[in-house]
Image (tube, rainbow, N blue to C red):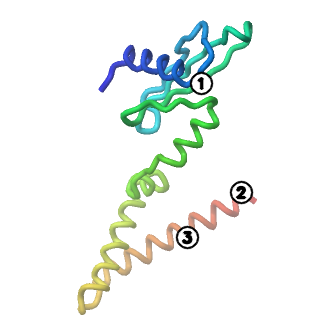
């Protein structure tokens, strides 16, 4: 893994290579590390042909080659399209540990229903019913509070 100084110099070089016109006052003004499974550097610069004007490009490091974006919207769109969170992580973000437990019980009941001929243990069915009731109750309660 590269250190911050290497990443900054790579960001400057990537921005130079992205533009055909000569750039002046090229500098890294901010580094966001970690940023969505990678790092993001904000690089400001001017152009010789347009004195007094400044631009900011964003360089994203998440693979072998850095990607240069002309503005922040472009960088956010790219990361939004390419960043994939695991199912477990999304469940944790949605409802915490209780959601993970509910997910595990649901998967277990589905597995038992498909693979065994024995009835599903009543304790699991009751647990799933309680969990589903809780989540639907919370959803209805939150919807009423928003009104």
Q: Nearer the viewer, residue 146 or 89?
A: 89
Between the C-alphas of marks 3 and 1, the distance is 45 Å
| Quadrant housing the N terminus | top left
Which residue: 57% across, 36% down? 75
**Mark 3 and 2 residues: CB-CB less than 8 Å, in contact?**
no
Give the mark nearer the N terminus: 3 vs 2: 3
> Which callout, 2 or 1, points at the residue further toward the start of the chain?
1
Task: Check disc 1: other Cα within 10 Å, few if <14, some if 14-19, many if 20+.
Answer: many
Sooner in the amino-acid sequence: mark 3 or mark 1? 1
Q: In the drawing, what numbered circle is on residue 146?
A: 2
Q: Which mark is residue 36?
A: none
- For label 1, the residue is 57
Give the quarter of the image for residue 112. bottom left
Few, some or many C-alpha atoms within 10 Å of disc 3 (few <14, some 14-19, many ≥20)?
few
Q: Nearer the viewer, residue 88 or 44?
A: 44
Q: Quadrant of the C terminus?
A: bottom right
Q: From this viewpoint, which residue is outermost toward the front?
A: 20
Q: CA distance from mark 3 to mark 2?
A: 16 Å
Which residue is the site of mark 3?
A: 136
Residue at position x 44%, y 77% in the image: 129
Q: Is residue 2 above or below residue 93?
A: above
Q: Nearer the viewer, mark 2 or mark 1?
A: 1
Task: Please give the name of the residue rendered at 73% of the width and 12% of the height, measured from the top-left corner.
Answer: 53
Q: Is residue 83 left or right of residue 64?
A: right
């Amino acid at each position: 893994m590269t250190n911050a100084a290497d990443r900054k110099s790579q960001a400057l070089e990537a921005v130079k290579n992205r533009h055909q016109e000569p750039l002046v006052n090229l500098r890294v003004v901010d580094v966001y590390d970690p940023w969505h499974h990678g790092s993001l550097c904000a690089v400001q610069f001017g152009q010789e042909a347009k004195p007094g004007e400044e631009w900011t490009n964003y360089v994203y490091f998440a693979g072998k080659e850095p990607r240069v974006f002309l503005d922040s919207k472009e960088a956010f769109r790219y990361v939004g399209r390419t960043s994939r969170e695991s199912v477990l992580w999304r469940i944790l973000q949605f409802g915490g540990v209780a959601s993970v437990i509910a997910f595990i019980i649901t998967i277990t009941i589905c597995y038992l229903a498909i693979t065994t001929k024995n009835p599903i243990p009543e304790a699991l069915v009751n647990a799933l019913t309680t969990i589903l009731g809780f989540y639907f109750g919370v959803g209805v309660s939150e919807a009423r509070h928003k009104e």
